Image (cartoon, rainbow, N blue to C red):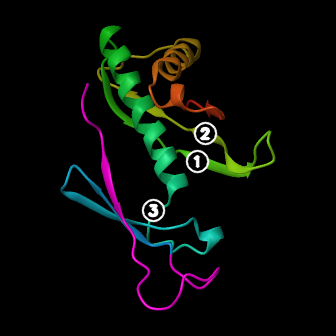
Amino acid sequence: MSELFIQLKWQLGEGELVQGKYSNSHEITYNNQFRMTADAAPDWGGDTANTNPEQALAASISSCHMMTFLALASKAKWPVSSYEDKAEAFLGKNSKGQMAVIKIRLNPSVQFNDGFTVSEQEMNEMHDRSHRYCFIANSLSEEVEFEVSL
């Protein structure tokens, strides 16, 4: 199995670690080369210029779903020419009364080459299979849904 890892770095900077007085801004490095700044979600005092864990989770499942969809579509010989998604993460209280990402909604839109078309049922079935085979979706305990655009 591949070794999958990130490196995360946070520093207090000036001041003290006092509730509401420190920054959650931190750096995440992927594969020892790609760096991004992350923060808390804006509702929790984070900077909208940075990504946050909730967005990263939505991006992760969107990416996994797309890659699974493309693998299944290629196997079915569907000539996919483009795939777009605008994933949404919803925060709220889970069944244990804890704050959580309680739902992620994927909004995939798939385009085909050469006038190829599939029925709404076929597209929904392919997305359902993609969801069931997606590693990230299988790692989550909360709801993940998708709304397909044809």
Kindly identify which numbered label has been placed on residue 105.
2
Describe residue 79's horizontal placement relative to residue 108 as left or right.
left
Q: Secondary structure at mark 2?
A: strand
Q: Which residue is mark 1?
A: 88
Q: Nearer the viewer, mark 1 or mark 3?
A: 3
Verify CB contact (< 8 Å) between mark 1 and mark 2.
yes
Please report whichever mark, 1 or 2, sits nearer to the chain's N-terminal start: 1
**Is residue 147 or residue 136 the one in the foreground?**
136
Q: Which mark is residue 130?
A: none
Q: Which residues are magenta?
A: 1-23
Q: Is residue 54 above or below residue 16?
A: above
Label 1 SS: strand
Instruction: Give coordinates of residue 95: x percent, y percent.
Output: 80, 39
Q: Quick one: label 1 or label 3, which is nearer the N terminus?
A: 3
Label 3 or label 2, whichever comes before in sequence order: 3
Residues 121 and 102: in front is 102
> Which secondary structure lies at badge 3?
loop
